[in-house]
Image (spheres, rainbow, N blue to C red):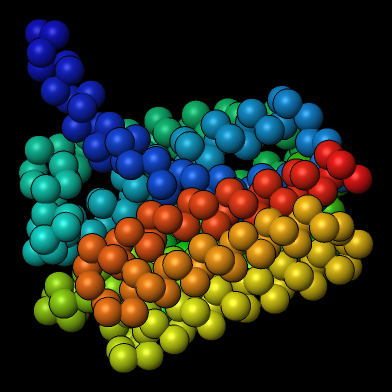
Amino acid sequence: MNIERIKERLTLYEKLMRLDKPIGTLLLLWPTLWALWIASGGRPGWLMTWIFCLGTLLMRSAGCVMNDLADRKFDAHVKRTRERPLAAGRVSVTEALWLAAVLTLAAFGLVLALNRFAIALSFVALALAATYPYTKRFLSVPQAYLGVTFGFGIPMAFAAVSNLLPPLCWWLLLANIFWVLAYDTEYAMVDRDDDLRIGIRTSAVTLGRYDVAAVMLCYAAMLAVLVMIGMKLHFGLYYYLGLGAAGLIMLYHYGLIRERGREGCFKAFLHNNWVGGVVFAGIAANYFWR
C-alpha cells in the first residue's frame, strides 16, 4: 500500500470518527468536567483530568463509528449524511468494526488507571454508546436516551473521585439530560424532513410544531436544576454569573431556531459548546476564588 493510499484511508477514518467535527467531543466533555470539579471540590488532579479528556475523545470517536455502522443505510438517504464514509461505501463494515474495537480498547486502557467502581461503570457507558443508535427505531424521543449516554461521564467522574454516586451526581446528570434534549432537538430539526421520509424517530418529529417551545423549556429546566445544585453546594457569585451567561446564550438560540430554518437550527446546535463552556467557567471560578 503506497503512501497516498494510506493517507486516503486515514482521512476517511478521521471523518468516520468525526475528528474534523469536534463539537460532539466538547458536548461530552463539558458535563464530565462539571462533575470532576464538583466531585473533587475544584481539585481533580491533572492525571485524572487528562484521563477523562482523552477518554472522552476516544469514546466519542468510537460512538460515531458505532452510530454510522447502525445508520449507514439511513444515512445514504439524508442530505446532510449521505457523504459519510460508510454511507457512501468508501469504508467497509469490517474496517469500521476494527476501528471501533481499537478505539474502545484504547479508552478502556485509560480507565484501568481509575478505581474498580469507575472501571465497572465503563462497561455501562460502552453499552449505552453501542445501543443508542438503535433507539431511533422505537423510541419517540431518543434524545432522552442520548442524554444519559452523553452524560455518563458524570457518574464515572464521581465514582473515580469519591468511589460514591451521591444524589448530587444524579441531579447533575438530570441537568445534562435536559441540555441534551434541547440541543439535540435543534440538531434533529435540521433533518426533520428527511427523517419523516425514511421513518426515523426523533424529538423534532415527535414534538412537531411544539419543538421550539420544548427546546426552550428544556433549557429552562437545565438552568433550574443547576441553580438548585448551586444552592445546595453554597456556590457564590461566579457560578451564577456562568449560569446567567448560559441563559443569554440560550435566548440567542431562540432567535436562531424560531423560524426552524436548517442553517439557524444547526448553528444553534453548534453554539451549545459555549453553553457548556460558560457553565464550567462558573464552576471553576467558584472554586478558584472561593
Count the marks: how many?
0
In front of the other: 283 or 255: 255
**Quarter residue 222 falls in:** bottom right
Does residue 70 appear to the left or right of 229 in the view shown? left
User: What percent of the width, then of the height, locates residue 213?
Assistant: 44, 86
Height in image: 170 above or below 275?
below
User: What percent of the width, then of the height, locates residue 12?
Assistant: 19, 32
- Residue at 17% x, 16% y: name it: 6
Height in image: 20 above or below 10?
below
- Residue at 50% x, 29% y: name it: 106
Q: Is residue 101 visible?
A: yes
Does residue 81 appear to the left or right of 224 in the view shown? left
- Residue at 42% x, 33% y: name it: 103
In front of the other: 61 or 95: 61
Height in image: 173 above or below 93?
below
- Residue at 15% x, 73% y: name it: 194
Q: Is residue 155 visible?
A: no
User: What percent of the width, then of the height, locates residue 276?
Assistant: 57, 54
Q: Please state, as top left, top right, bottom left or bottom right, where the N terminus lies in the image.
A: top left
Q: Please state, as top left, top right, bottom left or bottom right, where the C terminus lies in the image.
A: top right
Residue projecting furthest to the top: 2
User: What percent of the width, then of the height, locates residue 153?
Assistant: 62, 50
